[in-house]
Image: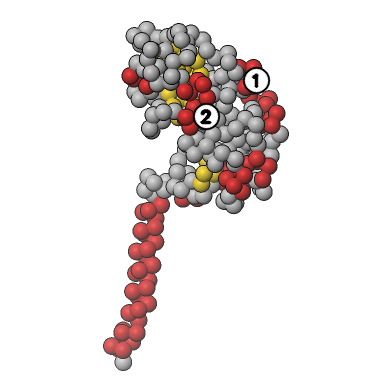
Amino acid sequence: MAASSSQSSLPSRRAFCASLAAGAALAGIADINGLRPTPPDALVRPPGSRPEPDFLNRCLRCGECMKACPTGGLQPTWFQAGFWGMFTPFLDPRSGACRPDCAACGAVCPTQAIFALPLEEKKWAKVGTAVIDRKTCLAWAEDRRCMVCKENCPYGAVDVVVQKGHRAPVPLVHEKRCYGCGFCEKHCPKFPPAIVIEPVGALRLNNVSFEITAKMAGLELEPEQHQGKAAGNDGGNMGTPPGFLE
């Protein structure tokens, strides 16, 4: 009988051990770099998004904002925001930039994880800042004329200027004018792009006006005032095709 009792208890022991092993494995997986939550400012979130902890608590992962985005720029995260951030939206400029004349994502969000902002307020909801990789940029690294980022920036946030030691004029970003819309990254001829949007300076608020906060920070996010005014010293003939020297 003792042997029989011992035999009958084996499956439950095995199940218990398997559960322990599975739990340990999951704990290990959740702690690897790919699943570990990243810092709150690690992703470019939709304009009007709340601070990251509140955003994650409110977001239903319903995908409505992504479906409403006319450019397809809002994409679901996988493990970039940690295990609990999966399927939340982020801006992927290579898929599509954030248009200044659109506030659809906030309008369809059912929980106000993304605020429903009128366009006049939304234009102040800075999502990030363009950052140039001078090691890969055609102008900076190869001395080749390229003005694609300047030509595609709706905020006039990119100057193309002459710099000592360079034959071709090189791009510089005006951080105060940059919204983080991603048109520069979208159209950059390099792969991977030599100019990317990072969530530097992004406004993530709960119950404060984006416009008031942005103006207090000295931001100049008014495209109509800056379009065509970021030329600076272009170094000569602006008609040369992007990416080429005369």
Residue in view at x 57 percent, y 34 percent: 98
Tag 1: amino acid: Glu
Residue in view at x 49 percent, y 27 percent: 184
Task: Give the CA separation, mark 2 to mark 1.
Answer: 16 Å
Q: Is residue 139 visible?
A: no
Say above or below: 92 vs 4: above
**Which residue position is annotated with label 1?**
224
Q: Residue furthest left?
A: 3
x, y (%) of residue 117?
69, 36
How would you rate the neighbour count of disc 1 (Cα within 10 Å): few for under 14, some for 14-19, many for 20 or more?
Answer: few
x, y (%) of residue 216?
64, 21
CB within 8 Å, label 2 to label 1: no
Say above or below: 99 vs 86: above
Q: Quadrant of the C terminus?
A: top left
Residue in view at x 39 percent, y 57 percent: 26
x, y (%) of residue 74?
54, 41
Say which of 115 and 24 sits in front.
Answer: 115
